[in-house]
Image (cartoon, rainbow, N blue to C red):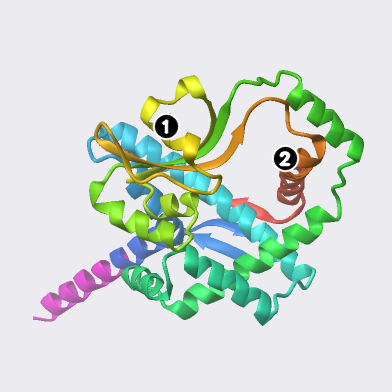
């Protein structure tokens, strides 16, 4: 009897340590950045939306595993960079006022379709509105820090703007063109929702971001000969800022917003100055941030165990 009890105790002891061992594998640390660390469980949770988006069930197992590894690597890199920025923001004691946060929060709520819809989506993920607000505030602190840091280090001389302007108009085509935003809606059942959001003043890009698997967003400039007659007929009477009703094209529907009608002489430098500045600033900011983050990775404590 005693031998049986000892055997049972040994059996349960082995079961216990097997569970502990399994938990350690799932929760093992995959990366450390300064005082922050990320576990395998947390990494998988962060990668889950991308798994759902890109891992087709019909993919061969080998290809699926290759894609999963690639997604994990990219998500891990993003976490490391985001954490480095967050730690730097803390070091410089960047703060966000309630007024700044409320403006940012209201803009996000509008983009996501209202607070009730946001709460529903959070509930599906097992999150609360308070969790969301806390994460949003942390995100805003990082954005503010980057704006302060980058803005103070990048200057765009007027000569460079004029040089870029000359490059832009060098091959200007005077034939009529239309700058358009296009929503390609794959699901007919979404049309009423799309039209409702447009009436509320929602941007086309924001609408597409709500339904990434069912709506495609395109922004481009088209020549008249690239457009079909029905659309061209509508565009000629439309004013910039207006949009077409849903137009059936094969198995999908197009909603098209007219941004600008372009023809004749190239736009003047003054008309393009803001967009030229934005283009150069974004280019320089991207280059600066890439160098800065690379330097942070080399000089701060960063360890990867994946």
Left-right relation of 127 to 38: left
Q: Which mark is residue 233?
A: 1
Q: Is residue 6 visible?
A: yes
Residue 283 vs residue 149, the one in the foreground: 283
Kindly indicate the quadrant of the structure image that contains residue 86. bottom right
Q: Residue drawn at (72%, 48%), measured in percent from left and top?
A: 293
Question: Magenta span: helix, strand or loop, mainly?
Answer: helix
Crowding around mark 2 (Cα neighbors within 10 Å: few <14, some 14 to 19, many 20+) is some
The residue carrying mark 2 is 279
N-terminal-most mark, 2 or 1: 1
* Residue bounds of the magenta highlight: 1-17
Q: Residue drawn at (60%, 69%), measured in percent from left and top?
A: 104
**Magenta span contains residue 291:** no
Residue 140 point in image, percent of width and height: 64, 67
Residue 69 vs residue 112, the one in the foreground: 112
Q: Secondary structure at mark 1?
A: helix
**Magenta span contains residue 4:** yes
Q: CA distance from mark 2 to mark 1?
A: 33 Å
Furthest-left residue in this view: 1
Q: Secondary structure at mark 2?
A: helix
Q: Residue drawn at (42%, 49%), measured in percent from left and top?
A: 208
Left-right relation of 136 to 24: right
Q: Is residue 192 above or below residue 247?
A: below
Residue 126 point in image, percent of width and height: 35, 72
Residue 287 point in image, percent of width and height: 74, 40
Q: Is residue 306 visible?
A: no
Question: Where does the N terminus fall, quadrant-wise?
Answer: bottom left
Kindly indicate the quadrant of the structure image that contains residue 61. top left
Q: Which mark is residue 14?
A: none
Q: Is residue 237 above or below residue 169?
A: below
Residue 198 vs residue 296, the one in the foreground: 198
């Amino acid at each position: 009897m005693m031998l049986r009890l000892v055997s049972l105790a040994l059996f349960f002891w082995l079961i216990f340590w097997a569970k502990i061992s399994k938990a350690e594998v799932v929760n093992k640390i995959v990366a450390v950045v300064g005082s922050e660390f990320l576990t395998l469980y947390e990494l998988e949770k962060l990668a889950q939306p991308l798994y759902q988006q890109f891992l087709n069930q019909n993919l061969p197992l080998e290809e699926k595993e290759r894609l999963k590894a690639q997604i994990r690597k990219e998500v891990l890199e993003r976490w490391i960079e985001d954490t480095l920025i967050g730690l730097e923001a803390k070091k410089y004691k960047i703060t966000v006022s309630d007024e700044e946060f409320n403006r940012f929060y209201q803009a996000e709520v509008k983009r996501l379709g209202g607070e009730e819809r946001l709460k529903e989506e959070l509930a599906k993920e097992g999150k609360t509105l308070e969790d969301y607000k806390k994460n949003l505030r942390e995100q805003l602190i990082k954005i503010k820090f980057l704006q302060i840091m980058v803005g103070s280090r990048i200057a765009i001389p007027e000569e460079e703007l004029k040089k870029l302007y000359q490059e832009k108009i060098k091959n200007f085509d005077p034939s009529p063109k239309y700058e358009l935003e296009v929503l390609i809606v794959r699901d007919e059942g979404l049309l009423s929702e799309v039209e409702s959001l447009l009436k509320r003043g929602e941007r086309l890009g924001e609408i597409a971001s709500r339904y990434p698997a069912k709506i495609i967003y395109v922004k481009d400039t088209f020549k008249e000969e690239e457009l079909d007659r029905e659309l061209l007929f509508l565009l000629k009477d439309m004013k910039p800022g207006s949009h077409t009703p849903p137009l059936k094209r094969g198995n999908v529907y197009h909603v098209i917003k007219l941004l600008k009608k372009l023809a004749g002489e190239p736009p003047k430098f003054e008309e393009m100055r803001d967009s030229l500045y934005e283009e150069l600033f974004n280019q320089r900011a991207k280059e600066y941030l890439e160098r800065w983050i690379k330097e942070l990775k080399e000089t701060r404590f960063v360890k990867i165990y994946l």
